Amino acid sequence: MGNSLSIENIHASYGAVRVIENVSMEVDSGKTVVLLGTNGNGKSTLIKCIMGLCRPSEGRIVAEIDGSKHDLIGMTTEEIVDLGIALVPEGRRLFPKLTVEENLALGAFRQKAREQMKSNLEFCFETFPRLAERRKQLAGSMSGGEQQMLALARALMLAPKILLVDEPSVGLSPLLVGRTIDAIRDLKKKYQLTVLMAEQNFTQAIRIADSGYVIVHGEIAFNGKTADELNNNDLIRKFYLGV
């Protein structure tokens, strides 16, 4: 049974400002799809539409979870999370005055995750040993790389089927960006996740992409059905590689 996303003709605005125009995407089960775009082109807005944090004015977003289809438009964020769709938000959005362990416990929002909290916590500490070492440390006192690990682990505590990751490279050094992207790849394989990652660092994102889209001024400008197609596209060379 599959876990996928189908985004059809989405339009979204903030007041009178149109941000997304007629965006359609497919995120197939078990795949890592990257949404590439520089700042201000609508990547985060689309992620918010999927999570019910921004209401599209037109279009459909359908999630297939364990073979059952759900129309996400009109659902609350809590209902979407309860389906097993987890978000690692831009900027991590941790609770800085709570410990690592407390932040992870808050990730186990849905009933199924609460039932698996102990085993999921063990999985998180096994995957990120640094978090196990610092389980009693306040999240706000950790480095940027450690906080990104914690944000990923918190999403895993939800026992997700589909993982959305918004700009994981923001605020990190090049070395930590590479480690974060590697962690997303490893988690996807280990937990058989379907991943949609919004990112502006093309060089890093392409390393783990099965396919991807380029968004420019709120519209899909290119759909690369394979990593090779993304690598060999003139639009990407122009915007990301300076060629």
Image (tube, helix red, strand yellow):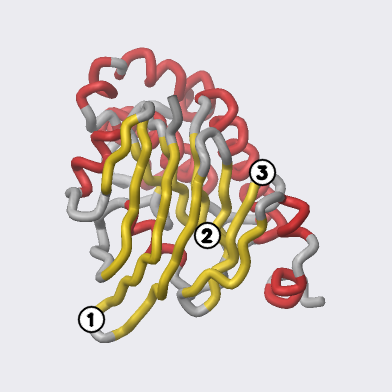
2 or 3: mark nearer the eye: 3
Which quarter shows the C terminus? Answer: bottom right
State left or right for residue 139 relative to residue 34: left
Q: Residue at x 70, y 74 (%)?
A: 235
The mark nearer the N terminus, 3 or 1, is 1
Q: Return the residue at label 1.
A: 15
| Residue 106 in sight in this render | yes
Q: Residue at x 48, y 44 (%)?
A: 148
The mark nearer the N terminus, 2 or 1, is 1
Q: Report which quarter residue 55 is drawn in.
A: bottom left
CA–CA distance between discs 3 and 1?
Answer: 36 Å
CA–CA distance between discs 2 and 1?
Answer: 26 Å
Q: Return the residue at label 2.
A: 170
In the image shown, does 104 or 49 lie closer to the viewer?
A: 49
Q: Is residue 182 above or below residue 66?
A: below
2 or 1: mark nearer the eye: 1
The mark nearer the N terminus, 2 or 3, is 2
Q: Return the residue at label 3.
A: 208
Residue type at mark 1 is: Gly
Q: Residue at x 58, y 60 (%)?
A: 213
Circle 2: is it few (<14), some (14-19), or many (20+) Cα within 10 Å?
A: some
Check disc 2 and report its element: helix, strand or loop: loop
